Image (cartoon, rainbow, N blue to C red):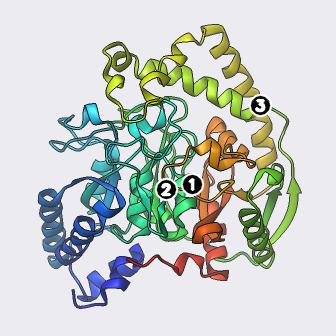
Amino acid sequence: MSTNDDHVSFATIRELGRMIRSGETTPTRLAEHFLGRLETIGPELNAVVTLTRERAMREAQLAEDELASGYDRGPLHGIPYGAKDLLATAGIPTSWGAEPLREQIFADDATAVKKLRDAGAVLVAKLAMIEMAGGMGYNQPVASLTGAPRNPWNRESWTGGSSSGSGAAVAAGLVPFAIGSETGGSILSPSSYCGLSGLRPSYGRISRHGAMALCWTLDKLGPMCHTADDTGIVLQALAGYDPADGSTLQQTYRYEPEIARSSGFRLGVLRQGLDLVQPEVNANFEAACTALGSVATLENVELPDYPYGDIYTLILSSEGAAAFEDLIERGVISGLTAPEDRLGGYAGLTVTAVEYLRAMRVRRRINDEVDALLSRYDAIVHPATNTVASPIGVNFDLFAKPWSRRNTLTSLGNLSGFPALSVMSGFGERGLPTGMQIAGRVGSESTLIAVGSAYQQLTDWHDQHPSD
């Protein structure tokens, strides 16, 4: 590598693309660089399930040959990435984070993986995750076949779940970006805990065909990157209708970075629940709002009064039990790592159809009222998580007291299917990152990215990275 290795490790997608096209580096050299970091640092962080070296070098060489011949597939051409290990990859194990499924292999790539391949991106690793994406009710960081993924900012701390390996790998500079999934916070939480820019797109924006199903009406895939701008680049490659996934949106998505608005943004500031947020997280959020005040009009907002968390939990429990019914009945879950996960799947089997339908009816009412609220703003801002990452080996509930593990806006966002972006807002206890959540109406991803990019032009948190 002819350039400074540390700079390469934490370079943005745009920077890496410029380096490739200027001849400063090549796709094969980038692939070797990140594979080397995955091999040496990845095991220390419990971040990697499978290195895809053979496929990576084949894809990198193809990208190199195509670019040399003048065929340019776009900004991801020749850029390495990692995929959460619930995305099917042809002929390569896809474990769903579960020890009993360590050798599970599918014949075809997931649609998201195919789309990234078509964009010229290079798959270098399948990344660690919480077993079954947390659908069995885990309550501790060790619920993964790799062991607890460790936070690069403080290796005695967790990275967040369930896209835990994705968070560790991007934060440590093992990959330029990763694909995570979210059902109840699994992109926003590790992005916040690891200091990343992580985007949970609108429900249906990205096809889930070939991804492990946890909750059909809640699951979403999305990018975890170094900057807000990077998330837009990756989202454009992934977005689009897929006949294999009937939930995908018909609308075409094109990411075009917004030019700064002369009139500024109109932002709602959600301060409900801040009394249940760690003091450092709260202080960093208020500082972020102050910074945004130079490019936005800020107005306090309040959410309609509904039991968002309870409704979310009932829907997740019942749909998850249906999704994993075969594994539960065959006793596969008895081989999971966390003791509570070996029993957690059974609770959802007791939810009645009446309870589920009642929850879905209330959900529709919530969606209508919340969309009306969001329509008044470009975005609403709130902490991405209520605390910093928990220590390894500590039960989540014990760590969270006296604060709350449940983030109201995240629960609501997943219920209503609207997008949200987490950006780093500073540091809290034990030197761990904190995050701010920027959320908006369904389909508003580009506006959220514009707000996040404006914030990142005002601050330098996203430029800070942990040392090896």
Amino acid on which disc 3 is placed: Pro
Which residue bears the numbered disc 1? 390
**Dot 3, crowdedness within 10 Å: few (<14), some or many (≥20)?**
few
First in residue order: circle 3 vs circle 1: 3
First in residue order: circle 3 vs circle 2: 2
Which residue bears the numbered disc 2? 158
> Residue at (38%, 18%) from the top-left corner?
328
* Percent coordinates x, y for residue 354 in the rendering: 66, 8
| Mark 1 touches mark 2? (CB < 8 Å) | yes
* Percent coordinates x, y for residue 18 in the rendering: 34, 83
**Dot 1, crowdedness within 10 Å: few (<14), some or many (≥20)?**
many
The kind of secondary structure element at disc 3 is loop
Q: 356 or 349: nearer the eye?
A: 349
Amino acid on which disc 2 is placed: Trp
Which residue bears the numbered disc 3? 307
C-alpha separation, residue under disc 3 versus residue under disc 1: 26 Å
The kind of secondary structure element at disc 1 is loop
> Residue at (18%, 44%) from the top-left corner?
92
- The quarter of the displayed image where residue 108 is located: top left
> Residue at (32%, 17%) from the top-left corner?
331
Q: Is residue 137 left or right of residue 148?
A: right
C-alpha separation, residue under disc 1 versus residue under disc 2: 6 Å
| Mark 3 touches mark 2? (CB < 8 Å) | no
- The quarter of the displayed image where residue 206 is located: top left
Amino acid on which disc 1 is placed: Ser
Residue 72 seen in this snapshot = no
Q: Is residue 91 left or right of residue 295?
A: left
* Percent coordinates x, y for residue 38 in the rendering: 27, 65
C-alpha separation, residue under disc 3 versus residue under disc 2: 28 Å
Residue 286 seen in this snapshot = yes
